[in-house]
């Protein structure tokens, strides 16, 4: 799997990677398959995001090739945690397939601003 050149840290579990660019540290880019097996890797990156003071945490899901209910619920849980801290989650680049997963798992609030 090719690594983007702007990635200072990367967590790799099977077919899932996350990347945080030094030029946009408030944006987490997800690539590959977000499922039950890769949620722990996502959680580690989300924990890092919680330790920063960004008012808005952006997650770019445009690179996901698959997302199951575990992945959708992990993102929804992160959104709830951010809200309790007065912060926001912004999910970006969700295609029709991923929007359908969010609808079916009742996590469509991930697509709402805020």
Image: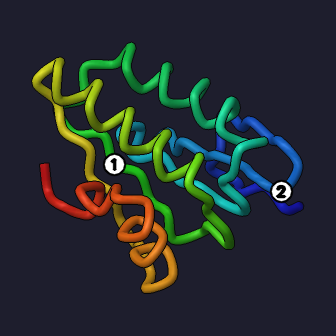
Horizontally, is 80 left or right of 60 in the view? left
Residue 63 is situated, as x and y percent measured from the top left of the image, at 60, 69
Which residue is at the far bottom? 96
- Residue at the image point whose x is 29% and y is 55% from the top: 110
Of the pair 42 and 68, the residue shown nearer to us? 68
Could you tell me which quadrant the N terminus lies in? bottom right
Q: Return the disc, 2 or 1, that comes first in the chain's sequence.
A: 2
With respect to residue 18, does 64 lie above or below? below
Q: Nearer the viewer, residue 63 or 81?
A: 81
**Residue position marked by numbered label 2 in the rendering:** 15
- Would you name the residue on which mark 1 appears? 58
Instruction: Tell me which corner region of the image, top left, top right, bottom left or bottom right, holds residue 44.
Output: top right
Left or right: residue 17 versus residue 51 is: right
Q: Is residue 93 left or right of residue 61?
A: left
Q: Secondary structure at mark 1?
A: strand
| Residue at position x 43%, y 78% in the image | 100
Q: Residue 52: where, in percent of width, then height?
A: 34, 19
- Relative image position of residue 86 (x, y in whole percent): 10, 24
Residue 50 in the image, given as x and y percentages of width and height: 37, 20
Q: Residues within 10 Å of mark 2 (few under 14, many from 20)?
A: some
Residue under the image location 43 percent in, 44 percent down: 75
Label 2, label 1: how many angstroms apart (C-alpha)? 21 Å
Query: Looking at the image, do the residues carrying marks 2 and 1 touch, with CB atoms under 8 Å apart?
Result: no
Within-10-Å neighbours for mark 1: few <14, some 14–19, many 20+:
some
Closer to viewer: mark 2 or mark 1: 2
């Amino acid at each position: 799997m090719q690594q983007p050149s702007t990635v200072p840290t990367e967590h790799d579990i099977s077919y899932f990677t996350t990347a945080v660019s030094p030029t946009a540290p408030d944006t987490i880019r997800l690539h590959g398959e977000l499922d039950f097996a890769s949620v722990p890797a996502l959680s580690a990156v989300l924990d890092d995001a919680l330790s920063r003071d960004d008012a808005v945490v952006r997650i770019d899901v445009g690179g996901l090739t698959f997302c199951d209910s575990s992945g959708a619920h992990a993102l929804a849980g992160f959104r709830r945690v951010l809200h309790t801290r007065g912060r926001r989650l912004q999910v970006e680049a969700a295609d029709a397939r991923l929007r359908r997963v969010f609808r079916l798992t009742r996590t469509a609030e991930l697509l709402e601003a805020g």
